[in-house]
Amino acid sequence: MMEKMIFGRYVPAHSVIHRMDPRSKLLMIFLFVCIVFIANNSWTYGLLVIYTFAMIALSKVPFRFIISGLKPVLWLILFTLVLHLFLTKEGELLFQVGWFSIYEEGLRQGIFISVRFFLLILMTSILTLTTTPIEITDGMESLLHPLNKIKFPVHELALMMSISLRFIPTLMQETDKIMKAQTARGVEFSSGPIKERVKAIIPLLIPLFVNSFKRAEELATAMEARGYRGGEGRTKYRQLSWGLKDTTLLIFLVILSVLLVLFRT
Amino acid sequence: MDISLQEVEYRYQANTPFERLAIKDVSIDIPSGIFLAIIGHTGSGKSTVLQHLNALLKPTTGKVMIGDREVNAEKKQKNLKAIRQRVGIVFQFPEHQLFDETVEKDICFGPMNFGVHEEEAKKRARIAIKQVGLSEEILSKSPFELSGGQMRRVAIAGVLAMEPDVIVLDEPTAGLDPRGRREIMDMFHSLHLERKLSTVLVTHSMEDASKYADQIVIMQNGQVYKKGTPNEIFSSPEGLLELGLDVPEVVRFQQKVEEKFQTKFSQTCLTVEKLTEEIASMVKRGEQE
Ligand SMILES: Nc1ncnc2c1ncn2[C@@H]1O[C@H](COP(=O)(O)OP(=O)(O)OP(=O)(O)O)[C@@H](O)[C@H]1O
Ligand SMILES: [Mg+2]
């Protein structure tokens, strides 16, 4: 029932993107999120689309799989598009039936913003699909390391993140299991009137919460029992290594940013 | 109600990179009133098979007949609730499904979902809680303040209160103490006899399989490896041992006795009583000679 979700899931494969240093991927996402906002016409959006699809191709994750996993978000995107069509009333009038009218600017902005949204989600999916949660947190911790100087709890943050990422699949599995158990007891999650379906959430959420709290407690005990005492003086088993491909990737991204600035209107 | 799986194959997460073939070419008949045990290694597909019995999973190929309804990959199913009322499943670690304020409400949850009135549901809850060996006082407690074993029993009571025609048990006694195991299993067995319930039991205990089952199915790597009566299955234990599965202690004991005395009993004994008789008659024969 929850099988199609792809958030926070790692797809093992042998691709350049998989082998890259998590730090370069994180930096790339960060930069990408910034430069997406530079684009403001078809040329610049075109460049972004090409770049994104090139990254997907390099990552060797089947495109069909990414799309099928993004279905819930596609609805959200469609919703933004419709909202823009309805609410932006600038530019030339393109189409009118009774009270319903579409303006040029609304269409333009709606499409651009949907594309922007879509690209952002695609890029972040590439990150999570090609990088194990552990790598992501290691990269994060290493990038944020300088903040330690101002007493920012970098290690704790990284730990929190790795634990949450680690337990997303577990939570999904558990949701699936409890849904099945309650379905067997006559709950209908995917059919019947809306009111009933909303009510059906309670027998799902309560066991889920109870189990999560129990698990958190057990995890804390287990960590303490193994002598965990925070980040101070802790060494790393996995060493990150920055390579030529990481530099290359970032250079490409810089070139992209320059092009975007040049072509924007 | 008869249930039959016909050449069922199931893939988890079909059409994704995580696709995984869990069972294939599985055909099992579960005629009304039978006690069927399914045994096999961990990961051999037992739980996957069980979830087909009330249409929680739809086969990716093949079909499942539940009563006169056919469940297959193509057909869009309507009103599966009717099936689920008649086929009750006790899942592996069912205590994770408890959620309501009181034990009583939780047990009534299933029946009331299927349209049973509150009064009737409460009556059933009182009966069910006794069947699983707990006292009525527990009904007013919160399910979360119970011990693991008590939670397990409450969860089982919740399924019993649905009064299904077919009861499906996925290792219902795993993690209980030995006496609790025997009590629960004896309870299921007597229900099976009294109410003519079809019972499907997944178990790792060869003792339980040989003691209660009319038919045994052995699963291996997602396929049916062997089917037969307990006698047929355990009288040639070589195959089982090859798979790394155990045989009941009684059977092992018989083998040892036969080896030691260079003899062969007329049959494979599955109970201590039978074996005692065989040995006694052997001893008597020995004295006469
Ligand atoms: N939700 C799921 N997603 C993906 N694969 C699964 C899922 N559930 C089970 N599997 C896989 O299907 C196979 C059969 O699993 P199943 O749970 O049916 O085994 P089992 O015989 O019940 O094992 P056990 O004795 O441990 O309960 C296993 O290889 C398992 O990894
Ligand atoms: Mg199982």
Image (spheres, rainbow, N blue to C red):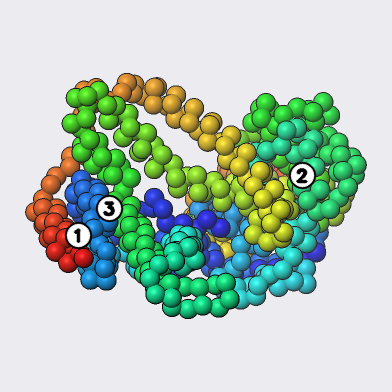
Residue A130 falls left or right of residue A166: left
Q: Is residue A42 above or below residue B35?
A: below
Mark 3, secondary structure of its residue? helix
Q: Amino acid at mark 2?
A: Phe
- Quarter in which the N terminus of chain B is drawn: bottom right
Read off the chain for label 2: B
Please report, as a chain letter, where disc 3 is located. Answer: A
> Residues under labels 1 and 2: Cα distance?
53 Å
From the image, tell me which residue sits under label 3. A33
Q: Earlier in the sequence, mark 3 or mark 1?
A: 1
Residue at horizontal 37%, vertical 34%? A160
Q: In the rendered image, which residue does mark 1 sit on?
A: A16
Residue B270 placement (x, y as % from top left):
70, 48
Please rate how many residues cluster around mark 1, counting C-alpha atoms within 10 Å: few if below 14, some from 14 to 19, many from 20: some
Q: Is A90 left or right of B196, judged from the image as shown?
A: left
Q: Nearer the viewer, residue B242 or A195?
A: A195
Measured from the top left, where is residue B5 in percent x and y? 66, 68
Q: CA distance from mark 3 to mark 2?
A: 48 Å
Separation of residues labelled 3 and 1 (CA atoms): 21 Å
Kindly identify which residue carries mark 2. Answer: B109
Q: Is residue A61 above or below residue A153?
A: below
**Pointers 3 and 1 within a single chain:** yes
Depth-wise, is mark 3 or mark 1 nearer the camera?
Answer: 3
Do marks 1 and 2 both belong to one polypeptide chain? no
Residue A79, compared with residue B185, is above or below; it is: below
Describe the element under mark 2 as helix, strand or loop: helix
Q: Residues within 10 Å of mark 3 (few under 14, many from 20)?
A: some
Residue B75 percent across, percent down from the top left = 65, 75
Query: Camera-side residue: A218 or B93?
Result: A218
For mark 1, name the chain: A
Have a look at marks 3 and 2 and say if they share a chain. no
